[in-house]
Image (cartoon, rainbow, N blue to C red):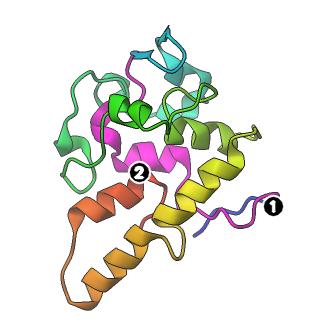
Amino acid sequence: MKIKFKDRPEFRPDLTPKEMLESGVFGGTYYRDIYSRVTNREYKNSWKEFPKKWFENINVKKYVTSDVCDKSINKYKVKSGSSLEFWEDRGWIKPIDPYGWFQWYCRFYLGRRSEDDTRQIKRWSGVAGENGRFRLWLKKIEKNKKDSPKIRQLLLQWGVEI
């Protein structure tokens, strides 16, 4: 079931942030303690700003704040994604959300609206939206009776599960 946001009807992920965390995303490292080169600040325990119920029945140390990426935690058991440094180097991380897209989504889901919404939704659409490059690529692979765990994991990281 797609999630609907009345004020942004073009943004329709399949999964809530809680469902994404429960599904196994980011190798357990997303909300680890970081130093952001974008803000020149350290961030610790950033996950605690979100509802406690999102983390019920989840080993936070292993699935949310680990310093080491563990692909066995990921739903499709593959490594997917790039480092924070990679994203910072390309200018994709903005000071408002120093962890990146998923942090933006968590906050957006809870009702925060910001000057970065249009950019982030455009990024989501280009990757995982109905005509996003990886969604279309996965459909093409499936049509040929094959599968791609890496693309499935990547889409999961953008809140889409096909």
Q: Mark 1 points at which residue?
A: 6
Label 1, label 2: how far apart the Cα atoms are: 23 Å
Q: Looking at this view, is 126 or 70 the one in front?
A: 126
- Please say if 132 is above or below 105: below
Label 2 element class: helix
The answer to whether residue 156 is seen in the rendering is yes
Tell me which amino acid carries mark 2: Gln
Q: Tag on residue 122? A: none
**Percent x, y for residue 124?**
54, 57
Residue 141 shown in magenta: no
Crowd class of label 2 (few under 14; some 14 to 19; many from 20; radius 10 Å): many
Quarter of the image where the N terminus is located: bottom right
Label 1 element class: loop
The answer to whether residue 162 is seen in the rendering is no
Q: Mark 2 points at which residue?
A: 157
Q: In this view, does 78 lie to the left or right of 132?
A: left
Q: Give the range drawn in magenta.
A: 7-33
- Please say if 161 is above or below 96: below
At 61% across and 58% down in the image, what residue appears?
122
Residue 9 shown in magenta: yes
**Percent x, y for residue 25?**
35, 45
Tell me which amino acid carries mark 1: Lys
